Image: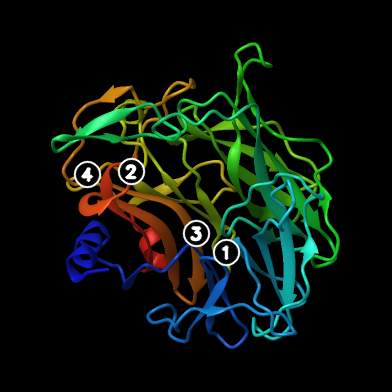
Amino acid sequence: MNHDFDKRVAGTLPKETLFLHTYAGAASIKELKDGRLLNIVGRLEKQISEDGGETWSEPAPLTDRSGNQIVGNSANLVVLKSGALGLIYAFTPEGDKGRPAWFIRSEDDGENWSDPVLVSEPSIKAAIWNDTAIVTSTGRIVLPVYWYVGKRVIIPQGVSAAVGLFGDEWTGVGGHGYENIIDTTWVYYSDDEGQTWRRNEDGEMMVTIDYSAGGHFSCEESVVAEVSPGHLLMVHRTQLGRLFQSWSDDDGSTWSHPEPTTLASSRAPACLRRVPGTDDLLILWNQVSGDEIERGRQRHRLTAAISQDGGATWKFRKNVGALDGDETTYVEPPPIRSYRAANYVPRLPHSDRVMDYVSVGFWKDRVIINSKFKERGSDIDLPPRGKGVRTTITLGLPIQWFYEA
């Protein structure tokens, strides 16, 4: 990536940013026993940092005990209760009709990995995303997954029939507002450090309004955190103008019906993590209004907030990234209904940027954030979405920054 692009990205971030890397790849970061950071990026390559994310080694492939390369994507790196590392990832063997998830473990800080164990049922379709699995205080591994019901029809703009003018050209905007499917969410969990896996006992989750009289809606790309021993909070991406949430009082075995939060959101996933050494929760999400969604600006603001009461309320809202000149840090949650970009939205701003699909790591007194980053208007042509740059970025911020009013 060129210097001018790096400078433009840096200009969108808080002045307290400690470091910035572009082209880092979708990440799952954990601290090792000796204080180094291990980052699993892209199609399962590892990087090491000895200085809290300031610098990283060159990506190297993951290998099993026999030296064979491990192939996959959507890395979920966890530290098991025993101190070993676990890695959940997606890989579809040739001839398999599903999209299965797999688990491997390492006893030597990621140098060598075990043979894979199947997490999902054979030939099941179960989509996972980077860095959504957790290990609870009991040692249970909890992994949210999702898949869709219905027949997916691909329209010319991909997942949106909406377009807007950027400069003198029409370009695709929005996403997932013009589909005839419903995504449902469920959980896999393991009580023996990944050797065997079970589904949650009460079926898949979806959003229903007025006991289905008001409709059924997708509940997808969910994230989970432990609020207190055995008590888990799951946050769901929806199309209803807000994030929704479910609770478990039995360490993830069963879950409450998804209910709306007070967090205004586009149809984009959140990142939810418990701050180490505290009972506080950190959330990062695309906070936007219903009007912004309909104008095609669905992921241009990445907001962080802290909850100190188990997810009941969220405070210290601050933007990690936003469009030029945007100082909005609180968006009133809109009425609950389906929101999507209009077919023809108003002209897009010259600084049209997106930060989404966030993952988080912790090291001493800093938070390490990894995010997809998109910017329109470069010389790179990415049809049917128009011209622009798509990459990932990794940045560091002091933990204290998230607590400052």
Pick the residue in front: 185 or 227.
185
Whole-angstrom CA distance, mark 1 to mark 3, is 19 Å
138 on left or right of 401: right
Q: Amino acid at mark 1?
A: Thr
Residue tagged 4: 326
Q: Amino acid at mark 4?
A: Asp
Mark 1 vs 4, N-terminal side:
1
Residue tagged 1: 278
- Front of the two marks 2 and 3: 2
Asked if disc 1 and disc 3 are in contact, CB closer than 8 Å, the reply is: no
Choose top left, top right, bottom left or bottom right for residue 168: top left
Above or below, 183 against 76 in this view is above
Above or below, 58 against 183 in this view is below
Q: Please, what secondary structure does the residue beneath circle 1 have?
A: loop
Asked if disc 3 and disc 4 are in contact, CB closer than 8 Å, the reply is: no
326 on left or right of 154: left
Residue 298 location, x and y as percent?
36, 37
Pick the residue in front: 6 or 272.
6
Mark 3 vs 4, N-terminal side:
4
Whole-angstrom CA distance, mark 1 to mark 4, is 31 Å
Residue tagged 2: 383
- Front of the two marks 4 and 2: 2
Q: Please, what secondary structure does the residue beneath circle 3 have?
A: strand
Q: Please, what secondary structure does the residue beneath circle 4 have?
A: loop
Circle 4 crowding by C-alpha within 10 Å: few under 14, some 14–19, many from 20: few
Q: Which residue is depicted at the point 18% across and 35% down?
A: 169
Q: Please, what secondary structure does the residue beneath circle 2 have?
A: loop
Mark 1 vs 3, N-terminal side:
1
Whole-angstrom CA distance, mark 2 to mark 3, is 27 Å
- Front of the two marks 3 and 4: 3
